[in-house]
Amino acid sequence: MNTQSVFPYKLYLVISQSDCKEEHFLDVAEQAIQGGVDIIQLREKSDVLDTFLNKAYQLKDLTDKYQIPLIINDNLEIARKVDATGIHVGMKDIAPTKIKNQWDKSKCIGYSLEYIEQLKTEQVIAADYLGISPVFRTTTKTDTVTEWGVEGIREIRELTKKPLIAIGNIHLNNIKSVMDAGANCIAVVSAICSAADPRKAAYELKNEILK
């Protein structure tokens, strides 16, 4: 993915089995795709390698069926083995520059932005898109550094042309303000994974983004 190209995705689902409660994550993912999700990241922080890999293969079959990208969270070995579209990492994970050196087939590297000063680093330069997290603080992710807010997105937008993926307590009532501030894409977890009807939830979110 060329960093200067238009990021074509609008609704980005970050999924794990634990986020889906009693529902199987593949069922939730398929309903979400049918509702409008157009890129999916598999994030299984607590799984052993073989379990994570098995889930990744299953999800890759599904995303291939619908011809949408699969991103793997913070595991280069799994991303390479399943031939994912890309990988998403943070400051404490493997660096984007190292990923480029070790995975020449990578089409997309996402990198989480925690400090505005990161924009000047070689890691941001190497990344294809930036994750802005959290836009609004959530109770489910407590290890975040900066709560960016809408003004934070606007500030970042003025400083970089990289595609910006906004995540963190985003819902139907605040999507428009986040997009208007300069986000290219909205990422969600519980807004779809915890929804009674993931397909409907995805449809409503996508419709609000496209307004």
Image (spheres, rainbow, N blue to C red):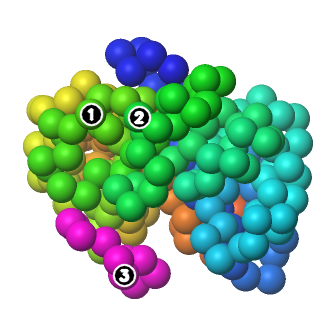
Point out the tag, 3 or 2, that comes first from the N-terminus.
2
Q: Nearer the viewer, residue 211 or 178?
A: 178
Image position, residue 141 (x, y; %): 42, 77
Element under disc 3: loop
Q: Quadrant of the C terminus?
A: top left
Residue 121 is at least partly visible in this image:
yes
Please identify, in this view, whether the residue under mark 3 or under mark 2 is nearer the observer.
2
The amino acid type found where label 2 is placed reads: Thr
Point out the tag, 3 or 1, that comes first from the N-terminus.
1
Q: Is residue 196 left or right of residue 6?
A: right
The amino acid type found where label 3 is placed reads: Thr
Please name the residue shown 55% across and 65% down the image. 189
Element under disc 2: helix
Image position, residue 183 (x, y; %): 32, 40
Residue where numbered disc 2 is placed? 97
Residue 127 is one of the magenta-drawn residues: no
Q: Is residue 94 left or right of residue 198?
A: left
